[in-house]
Amino acid sequence: MRSGLRRGELLGLRWSDLDLHDGVLTVRQALQRVGGELLIVAPKTQCSARAWPCPPSA
């Protein structure tokens, strides 16, 4: 399954970003390595902060 999400966006997801009732995943942050340290950062672009409808199979 392809979601179109970047690796850092996927790794930055939290359970609170998933709405099981409406079947929507919201990208609010990303995990990024900066100088050997892992940081939670804003998504790469403004368009990256988005809601993604989850298919029933997910």
Image: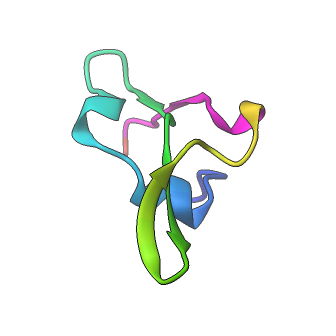
- Percent x, y of residue 9: 53, 53
In which quadrant of the rendered image does the N terminus lie?
bottom right
Residue at the extreme bottom: 36
Which of these two is toward me, 30 or 39? 39
Does the magenta segment cover residue 54? yes
Does the magenta segment cover residue 7? no
Q: In the displayed structure, would residue 28 be above or below residue 43?
A: above
Q: In screen coordinates, is 58 left or right of 28?
A: left
Which residue is rendered at x = 53% and y = 62% of the image?
A: 8
Span of residues in magenta: 47-56
Residue at the extreme top: 22
Q: In the displayed structure, would residue 6 be above or below residue 44?
A: below
Which residue is rendered at x = 35% and y = 16% of the image?
A: 22
Q: In screen coordinates, is 42 left or right of 20?
A: right
Q: In screen coordinates, is 44 left or right of 20?
A: right
Number of numbered discs overlaid on the protein picture: 0
Which of these two is toward me, 50 or 33? 33
- Percent x, y of residue 57: 37, 45
Q: In screen coordinates, is 4 left or right of 36?
A: right
Which residue is rendered at x = 43% and y = 75% of the image?
A: 37
Residue at the extreme front: 35
- Percent x, y of residue 52: 55, 32
Please name the colour scheme applied to the rendered image. rainbow
Which residue is rendered at x = 61% and y = 29% of the image?
A: 50
